[in-house]
Amino acid sequence: MTTSTPEADAAQTQGGQPETGKRRAAFHPLTVSEVRRLTDEAIEVTFEVPDELQGQYDYVPGQYVALRTEMEGQEVRRSYSICAEPTAGEIRVAIKRDLGGLFSNWANDHLKAGDVLDVMSPTGAFISKHQMTELNRPEDIDTDTEHVFVAFAAGSGITPVISIARTVLAANENVRFDLVYANKAAMDVMFVEELADLKDKYPSRFALHHVLSREQRISPLLSGRIDAEKLNSLFDDVLRTDDVDEWFLCGPFELVQLCRDTLAARGVPAEKIRFELFTTGEPNKPQGSIGRPVEVDPNADNFEINFRLDGLSGKVASPKHARESVLNAALRVRPDVPFACAGGVCGTCRAKVVSGTFEMDENYALEPDEIERGYVLTCQTRPTSDELSVDYDA
């Protein structure tokens, strides 16, 4: 996935909501209360949030949680977007089976009510620029002057989008929401009943456009893969780009990037576009070298990496020849350093550079203003100066 910060009520990303407070992303064991089959290849999992932890799991529509468990003798973390509007006492995510996916296949085949998994408190910046920070209070969302939303989702990219759509449609009767949802076939459509219910509930304000790549639909525009020609036709004939207040793009890299490029070519300001990636388009690329063993010779040529986390300072040496990430090095001395995807997508490992120089390989999570203020994704960042200091608390 993509697009996020470690503060759940984060302010200065993906639309600049006012900062209402900071919360360190942390794991807590939660019990699965229900597992519901969505399609042959996807499930919805509901976690029960006890009263004493509800403040930790308040969230904004569009955010995600990371799940953590032990599998085959090693720790496994996977991030999943929350698929329901804010509801006290529960967190719901959808898990779609991935080809060869260790966790997703296990979850689809074996996860059941009563099981306990470690669930990270919600985070992420794939959120509306309108006020969306109060659990179960969609009436507080400011949609008086800007009330046209359009979303493109593919496959499991629907999970954060349906949460956003449900919330903004319920918030204000002037809100209109168009959703273009791409799948291979009708049997692959997640939340098909819920989307139909939204259409029935808001027939004049919610428009749903299913695009199926492997099934023929009545309209040729809604059949086949979404390529540049089809996308421009959608903009010309179905969607109007000039009166849309916010765009939400969620899915694989190729589709999200195509939409971003096309919107930019049509003059849509970047600040109106929120995006989240589920893949980076480079599935064979190592994800931040997380867990890579590194042996340190104190007498050799090393970088010195300093970091601050939860008010405590840490220091670790990193061999210059190892070219390891800041996150990988920090985890060797502080196993609680926050991370989720480790692929430059989710933003959980964000920190601010205090001193030193660096290079960052990938960034699909930080906004330009965050980078200007010195923030990096530590899973993708390596020092280029003898000393580098970062602050996870900033």
Image (spheres, helix red, strand yellow):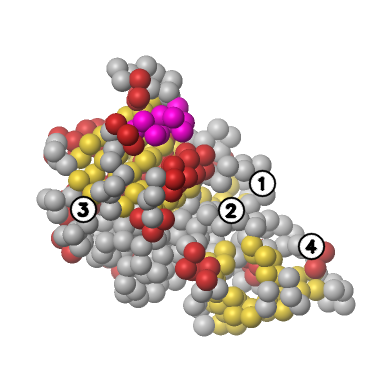
Look at mark 1 in the image and give the residue it sits on: 285
Residue 333 belongs to the span the image colors magenta: no
Looking at marks 3 and 2 on the same chain, the residue that comes earlier in the sequence is marked by: 3
Q: Is residue 147 visible?
A: yes
Note whether residue 27 is visible.
no
Rendered image quadrant of residue 190: top left
Label 2: how many Cα within 10 Å (few below 14, some 14–19, many 20+): many
Q: Which residues are magenta?
A: 225-234
Q: Which residue is mark 2?
A: 343
Q: Foreground mark, 4 or 3?
A: 3
Q: Secondary structure at mark 3?
A: loop
- Pointers 2 and 1 in contact (CB under 8 A)? yes
Residue type, label 4:
Ala
First along the sequence among labels 2 and 1: 1
Residue at the disc numbered 4: 322
| Disc 4 from disc 1: Cα separation | 17 Å
Q: Earlier in the sequence, mark 4 or mark 3?
A: 3
